[in-house]
Image (cartoon, coloured by chain):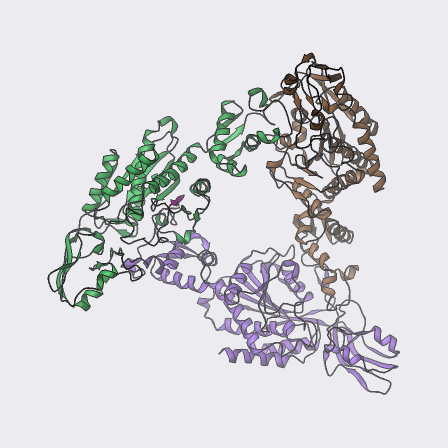
Chain colours: A purple, B green, C brown
Amino acid sequence: MTASLGQEMHALAARLFPINRSLTGPGVRETLSILQEHLQDLQIYEVKSGTSAFDWEIPNEWSVNDAYVKDETGKKIIDFKTSNLHLMGYSTPVNYLVTREELMKHLHTLPDQPTAIPYVTSYYSEDWGFCVADEDLQNIGDGPFEVYVDSTLGPGVMNYADLIIQGQTDEEILLSTYFCHPSMANNELSGPVVLTFIAKWLKEIPLKDRKYTYRLVMVPETIGSIYYISKNLESLRKVRAGWVLTCIGDERTYSYVPSRDGNTLADRVSKKVLSEIYPDYKTYSWLDRGSDERQYCSPGVDLPVASIMRSKYGEYPEYHTSLDDLSLVTPDGLYGGFVAMQAAIKMLEANAVFKTRVPCEPQLGKRGLYPNTSVKSSGHLVRDQMNVLSYCDGVNDLISIAELCKIEFTVALEIINRLTAADVIERLDL
Amino acid sequence: MTASLGQEMHALAARLFPINRSLTGPGVRETLSILQEHLQDLQIYEVKSGTSAFDWEIPNEWSVNDAYVKDETGKKIIDFKTSNLHLMGYSTPVNYLVTREELMKHLHTLPDQPTAIPYVTSYYSEDWGFCVADEDLQNIGDGPFEVYVDSTLGPGVMNYADLIIQGQTDEEILLSTYFCHPSMANNELSGPVVLTFIAKWLKEIPLKDRKYTYRLVMVPETIGSIYYISKNLESLRKVRAGWVLTCIGDERTYSYVPSRDGNTLADRVSKKVLSEIYPDYKTYSWLDRGSDERQYCSPGVDLPVASIMRSKYGEYPEYHTSLDDLSLVTPDGLYGGFVAMQAAIKMLEANAVFKTRVPCEPQLGKRGLYPNTSVKSSGHLVRDQMNVLSYCDGVNDLISIAELCKIEFTVALEIINRLTAADVIERLDL
Amino acid sequence: MTASLGQEMHALAARLFPINRSLTGPGVRETLSILQEHLQDLQIYEVKSGTSAFDWEIPNEWSVNDAYVKDETGKKIIDFKTSNLHLMGYSTPVNYLVTREELMKHLHTLPDQPTAIPYVTSYYSEDWGFCVADEDLQNIGDGPFEVYVDSTLGPGVMNYADLIIQGQTDEEILLSTYFCHPSMANNELSGPVVLTFIAKWLKEIPLKDRKYTYRLVMVPETIGSIYYISKNLESLRKVRAGWVLTCIGDERTYSYVPSRDGNTLADRVSKKVLSEIYPDYKTYSWLDRGSDERQYCSPGVDLPVASIMRSKYGEYPEYHTSLDDLSLVTPDGLYGGFVAMQAAIKMLEANAVFKTRVPCEPQLGKRGLYPNTSVKSSGHLVRDQMNVLSYCDGVNDLISIAELCKIEFTVALEIINRLTAADVIERLDL
């Protein structure tokens, strides 16, 4: 199962990898269409360029047919068709003969990472540019160079998608990811891919076992989440916990970025899950944020949205370069990300406040829940059970109880289930 | 006085030591009767077996006339009359000839403590058993063995006692101990003995100097406190602070187990008292609890009950064995326990909120409370007094004031008394 | 400017230094009269000896014409005219011939600091005394000695002063200092001098830029502030933050003494200012207080008054001796004190709560506040701005925002001003 699920996720990432995604355009539609093969009820929306969303406007749609730079011999020295990272995002169409000096002003490289093509965009200012590995820049000639960008940038639509999986209550869990980057694997495809497989898993759970309604959101980063919030703010008020899924597919570590509040249910779940599956996980601060939690947690929106990641954006050397590829993101890495999100969701579903049905300790012996012969060590045998019971006070939720009792959540849950079955405690929903 | 009081307490413990106590039975009545010699108004109660108490039932009464194991030569190799720990608590009557193998199934030993007879009970499941020092097990023959237990286990009563010492108000201090263990000294007799002498001291204090009403409770552990709570829950709502007295008679250390809340008046007093009389005292967590605070602090009861101990149950090697005897518990150890509880009670009685009678500092010089000549060092001479005064704000109680001023409670109290006498501050009861 | 302002302040201190100040008397009036040259609207008040103020009475007025001790040869061995510290404050008039032994009872010295004349007073008990450097005591003869104090101590007045600089609102900032010590520089003149120059600076700020009304108070210590509070308690209820200015003129360090509450606006400002201008500043506790914050923060008065100092009273070796002179207090030291108080006031004036005008992040790019080309490092370029914006939530004030964003207050303020100018956020007054 592990191996198989990780492989399936990696295969989906590999299929999506070559597509030229940006905020808008045909690459986005192709991507969403492939995801819809996995999630038939994924709702895909479009919104026209120029439409307002709070302080913003939906940008023009951008698409690229071809783009290259030829040297004085007519040889293509930079070619969009070999990597869509070569073309700066939202480059305007051009067909120029330029000097070496002029070309250099429009080239982006990373001298410290000479083999990496950097990822650069210019969403909100019209310009053109190419990105290239620094080592490939060393051999180009004196020019002049033919610069050719066959792109269109004009009124069109921005696409996004969501999927609502109705639960027993209208209280929502928000899982949001984005898909606006071209060929990058951790900081792009890991989020949509893990979210897709989380959605498939959620849909298999019987309704009776799903308390929460799940809102899965796939948007271009920033403008997409802003538009989504502007359209759905009232519904989003029902969100009890949420996560932005990104950078969740490599194997190196786990990371946590808090919500702005820092102590929401999403934060408490994130910390408990990660402390159990990877105690050395990295904790960042709100100041280190960088994705759509910026919008979900913004003043006036104030949703309880945190991030559980593997290697965090901006913190690994391959970030925003061509080196963030499908060798960095692995089946095991994706599976690890899936498992963490799954544990978070299971914790949310199981979490509740519990209350003993009578004052004082219940008599556990007569229910077979306590050893009948008291020996010197018996005090320790059922210690965890007695500790959990002592906090079934109608105030502490199960996450707090597990923390207070210094045990894993699943151990606390097992005890709670046994005590509930024995009718010793009752569950009070949050 | 010290020596004498410690000796008196130790003598009482020695007199009670040989009695075969359990949850119920004649040993309990004999014990309470002896304590009544010291406390004539101790109220002794009985409740019938089978009576309900929340989730529990009062167990059958158990008494033992004789119990032994004889070997194939007719020699008594285990004899209840030499130590009542030899018989497992609540053993049913038997008169069998058993094989060595069968006997072994019913013997309890401590291989790691070969000289110690362990203490074992089977309150809530009918069975028989013997407890024996591991080293004495080495020499027994091949059997068969005659096993003889002349006990009765059947409907009867459970006994317990309390003593209410009325104060000027109905607000209560609860002091609870238990007496259900046979011949063990720290984890049994130290509690009832110290409580008895605390009661004698309390009764000598004039009513005008006792703000609180004292509720002293002596019960068999667990079932006794559960029954007591079930009968007295409404009265117990008046408890402002309480302690379970147990393991309070050896000389090795002092220990503190918090209430479930962890920050009640009982906790604040316990920590302040122990930090002053034994700064290296051991602090345990609620997870380390183990006596009747389990009931007093249980959800739905929620009383402010902590524990001040010497060596805590479960934490010293002699615990629940025959080695917990009258050489472990000493006159000095008992006296140290008495002094700590006395200090806690004195602190509670003296504690109040105080308020200056005018804004700004009072003029202490004209009342002889401040040096009239200001020299370089005079700022420090009356520093504590000025600090205490600065917190007589009608909000901080005297425990907080002493902590804020980093002084002992008795130093703060002396200052408060001087300032009150000078009419500079007034006392506001809590 | 720095040098010049420091020099001006030092020159004023030098002019005031030789005057014989005490709680009352002509030295006080001369001092206030000189300060009035700088602050024409400084209000000078007088209150009669014997007038009540809460628990206190205004003391008699004390003045000195001459005072000395002559030895058996007629030589003046101690002479008030060489240092007014030689005469114990509030010494009664005497003209005695005394034995060496009798004289010694009335001499105060500091054996550990043999060159220092100590500062001693006897405000509230009638006595006489002389203070002398220990090394000068070594050579005096066998006597008898002529002791001559030509002082008057009798009904008169106590003087004090204040200055109200009206702002746009009636909410007040309190700046209080004292002037009752004779020739000492850090623990006396630094406070009145820095306060005078702060007042001159405040008066130059246009009314539209001063939200707060400033109440500047100059009183004899303790009795002066008590009387001032008793006369002005209702007005003082409008104080939002305040400081006692003293010991603010040497160069060795910065110090902070909290208010009794410890977390008032004055405390938050003090800590933020000092952490920026002198990160190693010394933090004292309320227990280390020692000046008029004792009255301003007393129970029943409870004002938000802290202290920002250079070397704190009682903590530097020259304190309350003749060594606390104009070589210890320097132009640079005074200027440093001025700058800290100025920064505190600027912080208070700029502090407010801010709120974004729309949900989600504003579009900063279209306002020229965000780089339009996204490169790998651009996330960091505008990081501070985005962080500040994320806390413009209508809850955090600017001091909190700067702390949360781990930036200097002035950096946060600059960002806030830019965002306010761009109409992206709005200011909500506290």
Name the side, left or right, on which B111 lies relative to C84. Answer: left
Magenta residues, start to end: B296-311
Quadrant hosting residue B321: bottom left
Judged by its main secondary structure, the magenta piece is loop
- Residues C180 and C244: in front is C180
Name the side, left or right, on which C76 lies relative to A314. Answer: right
Q: Is residue B415 above or below residue A118?
A: above
Q: Residue furthest left?
A: B74
- Residues A118 and C276: in front is C276
Q: Residue at 75%, 62% (x, y): give it.
A: C381
Q: Is residue A137 above or below residue B73?
A: below
- Residues C49 and A194: in front is C49
Q: Is residue B305 magenta?
A: yes
Q: Position of residue A375 (x, y in %)?
A: 29, 58
Q: Is residue C294 above or below residue B270?
A: above
Name the side, left or right, on which C421 lies relative to A262. Answer: right
Q: Position of residue C307 (x, y in %)?
A: 68, 37
Q: Residue at 64%, 27% (x, y): give it.
A: B375
Q: Is residue A421 magenta?
A: no
Any part of residue C126 in sight: no
Quadrant hosting residue B174: top left
Q: Position of residue B306 (x, y in %)?
A: 40, 45
- Residues C117 and A77: in front is C117
